[in-house]
Structures are given as C-alpha cells and as structure tokens.
Image (tube, rainbow, N blue to C red):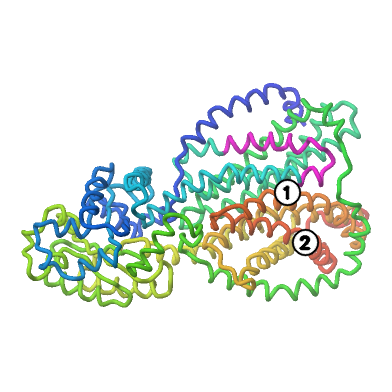
Amino acid sequence: MKFGKAVVKGRVVILIIALALLIPSVLGMIFTRVNYDMLNYLPADLDTVKGQRYMLEDFNKGAFSFLIFENADDKTMREASEKIKQVDHVATVLNFSDIADGAIPKELLPDKIYDAFNAGDDSLMAVFFDSSSSSDETMNAITEIRRICDGECLVSGISAMVTDLRELCEREEAIYVAIAVVLAVAAMMLFMDNWIIPFVFLASIGMAIVTNLGSNFFLGEISYITKALSAVLQLAVTMDYSIFLWSSYNEQKRIYSDNKEAMARAIHETVTSVIGSSITTVAGFIALCFMTFTLGRDLGIVMAKGVLLGVLGCVTVLPSMILLLDKPLGKTMHRSLIPKTKKIASGLVKIFPVFLILFGALAFPAYYGYSKTNSETYYDISKSLPKDMANVVANTKLKEEFGMSNTHMVLIDSSLDPKDVREMTEKLEQTDGIKFALSLDSVVGTMVPEEMLPESIESVFKSDRREMIILSSEYSTASPEMNDQIIALNKIIKQYDKDGLLVGEAACTNDLISITSVDFATVNIISIGAIFLIIMIVEKSISLPFILVSVIELAIFINLGLPHYMGESLPFIAPICISTIQLGATVDYAILMTTRYKKERHLGNDKRTAVATALETSIPSIVVSAMGLFAATVGVAIYSDVDMIGSLCALMARGAVISMFCVILFLPALFMLCDKLIGVTTIGFKPKKSI
C-alpha cells in the first residue's frame, strides 16, 4: 500500500519525469545502429567468420558483389569501372576489360576467364569493398554505385540485399506500429467497458516502448528484426497489465468513494498480480539469450527489458494518467461486447470428457506437424524478400544468365607450392556444381609469366600471408546440394592446407543451419524449465506446472504444426522464437484460471463448482488479452513484405487465439480429471473446513 499511496501522491511528478525521459529516449532511438545481416550473429570462433576477418586483414576486402551490365561493350565497362573505383570503400574492381587491359594479350588468356565475365550480351564486374558486408560504409557504397550507373547495372550479393532490406524496413516500420496501434485500439474499444481508456493505455505503453527503444543505444546495435518487432511485441504482451489495473481500479471504486484511495489499492493489487504474471513472460524472452546464434540474445534482452519497463509504466505512469483523466473516463463507460459467461462455463464443464478425448486426439498429429515444420524451415534470407526487390532481380539474372547462384572464397597459405595450388584448384573446379575457379594461376595460365600481371590484379588474389581462389557455384544457398558441395570443397582444401578456409554466404549459412538446430532444442528446454519452476513456486504445486505447461505446449504444437499440413515453409528463426514467446506470453491465461480455481477449492467449493467459477470469471480476461495480442500482430502479418517479420507476426497472432481456446477448453477438463492429484501435491489447496 505504501508504494500505491506514493504513486498517487507523486502522480504529477511521475508524469513530468516520464515526459522528460522521452527526449533522451528519442535521441537514443535515432542513434542506435540497426544490423540487417543475419550472418553477423554467428559465433566469432567459426572458421567461416574467421575467414571473413582474414579477408579484411590480408586483402583489405570484406564485402563482395557482382554487377551485371546488359548490352555493354568494353568501352562502357572500362568507363563504369573507373567511376566505381572512385567510390568510397571500393577496394578493387575486376572485370574482363581490367584483366585484358593491354598488359596481357587477349589471345593468351584462358577461355574460361572470358566465359566467367560474359554471357551473351551481358557482362559481369566483380567489386570488392574494404568494409564488411553489412556495414553502413558498404551499404552507402552500394547506393552510390547504383546512382553512378543510373540503372545500367544490377547489383547482386548479400551487401546489396542488406541495402535493399534496410530501405524496405525503414519504409515499413512506422506502418507496422500504426497498424498495431489502430487494431489494438479497435479490439480494446470493443471488448472493454470504456471508449477512451484504450488511448490512455496506448499513451502509457507508448512511453515505455520509446524508453525501451531509446535504451537500446547502450547495446551498441540491434537487429532489424528486433527493431521491427519490439514495439509491436511490447504493446501486445504488456497490454494485459494495463487492463488488470483498470479492472482493479473500477472494483476498488465500488468500495472506496475517494478515487485516490481506490487507485492506491488498485496499484497494490496490480503490483502483486502483474509481477507474478510478467515473470513468466520475461523468462520466455530470457531463454532466447541462451542461443549460440546471438540474434536470440539481441531480441531476448530488448524484449525482457521492454516487459519490465511495461510493468513499471503500468504501476506508475498509467495510474497517474487515469487519475488526471478520471472525470472524462467516468463519462465514457459502455457495456463490453463479451457476453455473460456463466452458462458457457457450466456447459463446458458438464461435457469435460469430450475435451479430454480431443486433447489426447490432437496431441500426436500436432506434435508430428510441429517436428516436421522445424525440419522444413528455410535459411536462404532472400526467400523472405519481395520478388521485385532490386537485389532479388539481380540474383535471379545472375543465376539464369551466368549459371551462378553463389560465390565461395578459398583462403590458403601463400607459401604453398604453386604446383599444389594448381592441383588443388583443378580439383575444386571439378567438384559437382562448381562452374569455374578464378585464381592467380587461372588468370596467369601456363603461357603468361606472373610478372606480366598488373599489380592491381595480383593483389586481388595474393597477399603476404594468404592466397585467394574464387569459386562460382551453381547451387542455391542452404540447399542439400550446397551442403554436399561445401563438405566436398572443405575436404579438398584441408588435403593441401589444414588451415585453409572456405568463406562466403553459403558456407556461413551452412554453419547457421548446424547452430540453430541445436539452439532450438536448448531454448525449448530452458524456457519450459524456467516457466515450470516459476509456476511451481507461484502456485506452490508439483502437479500444476505439468498441467499448465502441457496445455500451452499443445497450443504451440498446433500453431507450429499447421505450416506442415498447409504446405508452408517458415523462416528458420520463426520456430525458435515462437515456441518461447507463445509459451511465455500466453501461459498467463492458464495461471489466471488456475489461481481462481485454487481459491475456490480453498474456500470449500466442490471441484465442479470451483472449475466452473474459475472458467466463468477467467474467460473475459483471457479473451481480451488474446484479442489484444492477436490485433497487435495480425495487421503486421498481412501487410509486411518481409516474410521473416510477417511470418513471426502471423504465428504470434494465430498462437494467441489457439492458446486462448486451449486454455478455455482443455484446462478446465484437466482440472476435473486431476483434482485429487492436484489436492495432494499443492500447498494450501485443501478447503478451509477440512483444515
């Protein structure tokens, strides 16, 4: 009560502080860097990640792109090459005209050099940058190259993809939030009892969201997925806390005539309930921090922080705003659309065996679909992007015209015997799916002395410590054929140089596949274990955690199993994130009903009455909460052009509804079945009359 009274007394000061904090928070939002490259979240000790670092150290080359010129002659290519070389952070430009620049007669160059850079009327230009693939410097250079070429070339590669993705996300992010806000307000206006309280909720939650996003500045950078989803997710999962405070305040006003006293009591009630509820949500997000693929840590920290700020805002800023607007709020009350639930609850409890049978019948097909969906996810980030995006168009043309889907870089010791290098290069080139290999030896050939090669060309392939071989692959990223090719290439490389490395998008993605398959199991175990322990402590029971978690896990299996039966493929990050987010965010529905069920049994009611009462009183809160989460995410799912974001929001929206039905239908049935077991395994469960 002391805290509640302090908030009521200092309500004006609280609002002033909250508004003042918005200024540094907005500045923090503006200056927080956003990372658009998923491969940047791979562990630093992987060979593929080390190889990218070595390329920068030894060759001053990080990012790499192919530029496709249509109907361009040698003169046009030379002019374009000279202009592109002047762009900041362009390290090297390489095309057929650069190689055959007069220093080496064209007739002495191997045919494959010409074939590598030309296909029909189209010509290629390879551009190396002295910055990493997703750095701001590289993205700005890509933008400048496109401006210089004025539509005459297409830019392929992961750096171009990241550049296009940044532009798309920056354009859509504000719309995501606007859609979430509009639909969430509509849902609350319909399902709650006041016309303007949704706007008060949004003002309070909005302050917490801005503060959370601003505090990300101290993390250094966040991923584009975190930036796109954090505001929507924070709105969705913390709305419940505001609803609880409003309901408690209205209850207390019936008891206390003084609205300040009523609010102090409501804050006290809310702190007790919301802290217990938010712990499970925070635990779900913290579980993501245990992923080896550190995107999980990025999203987990930001969202756990957001939930805590949401709780703080709910018991400080929101009460202050409600008291300030108490009179207009009192004049805008209306009847909720949710009907009386007594008959519905009694009817559901009466036929509980039907739901027990349905629970058992759904378990196997749901789990089977869930296990298949996890193995059917895709890892090629380009598949999540619109087909008309400039980079996607460039990559498609590169594959169709030049037969190139991927580019590998092989790094070997520069002191290796030239004969061994030549032999290794031949074996690499003969590997299934490799279209050609470009190396110092392949450019020089057998007829051209290395001394005749321009220094600008030699520096592309050789440094003091390492030599580089460029391989062109016909196989797509993350395909089974690519996996086999990478294994074969690494085997050949290690035969000649045990420290040799295979670098590139496909090799990094292959590592990503290996890592996330382990992460999926790890995150699931940690999230289930943490939430199980929290429920056990909060409910003082051994059996209830099994029952509650089994109901929500079934909802998760159904949600993530449906894509398999619907023939859909999800982005790899979706199952990992959704399994923890849905568990953490919707287990509250089950905890709410369980708490009331225990209370009714403790008061001496029989199990049927206790279960029916718990169901009747919980349905309105569960429906409002689930519809809030659904409304905040479904619009983004429909609108987003980025499948990585759209899929996550679609799964969250669907998961909220599925969890709602599972809790309302299956949890009461399990209470009826396990009442005796719950009684002997739960502290404080026995009715008062028997104590």
Rendered-image quadrant of the N terminus: top right
Element under label 1? helix
The residue pinned by badge 1 equals: 628
Element under label 2? helix
Expressed as whole percent of the image width and height from the top left, the position of residue 193 reads: 85, 41
Q: Is residue 201 magenta?
A: yes
Q: Are marks 1 and 2 in contact (CB under 8 Å)?
A: no
**Of residues 220 and 436, the one drawn nearer to the viewer in this rendering:** 436
In the displayed structure, 628 sits above or below 575; it is above
Q: Amino acid at mark 2?
A: Phe
Expressed as whole percent of the image width and height from the top left, the position of residue 41 reads: 43, 54
Mark sitting earlier along the chain (1/2): 1
The residue pinned by badge 2 equals: 661
- Residue 244, located in which quarter of the rendered image? top right
**Of residues 76 and 422, the one drawn nearer to the viewer in this rendering:** 76
- Residue 221, located in which quarter of the rendered image? top left
Q: Is residue 586 left or right of residue 395?
A: right
Q: Residues within 10 Å of mark 1 (few under 14, many from 20)?
A: many
Expressed as whole percent of the image width and height from the top left, the position of residue 4 reads: 75, 30
Q: Is residue 177 visible?
A: yes
**Of residues 627 and 642, the one drawn nearer to the viewer in this rendering:** 642
Q: Is residue 66 visible?
A: no
Expressed as whole percent of the image width and height from the top left, the position of residue 583 reads: 66, 58
Q: Main secondary structure of the magenta part?
A: helix
| Start-end of magenta stretch | 187-212
Q: Residues within 10 Å of mark 2 (few under 14, many from 20)?
A: some
Question: Which label sits on residue 590?
Answer: none
In the displayed structure, 205 sits above or below 15; it is below
Q: Is residue 473 magenta?
A: no
The structure residue drawn at horizontal position 78% and vertical position 59%, both measured from the top left corner, is 682
Q: Amino acid at mark 1?
A: Gly
Q: Give the distance between the C-alpha atoms of the residues marked 1 and 2, in whole angstroms.
A: 15 Å
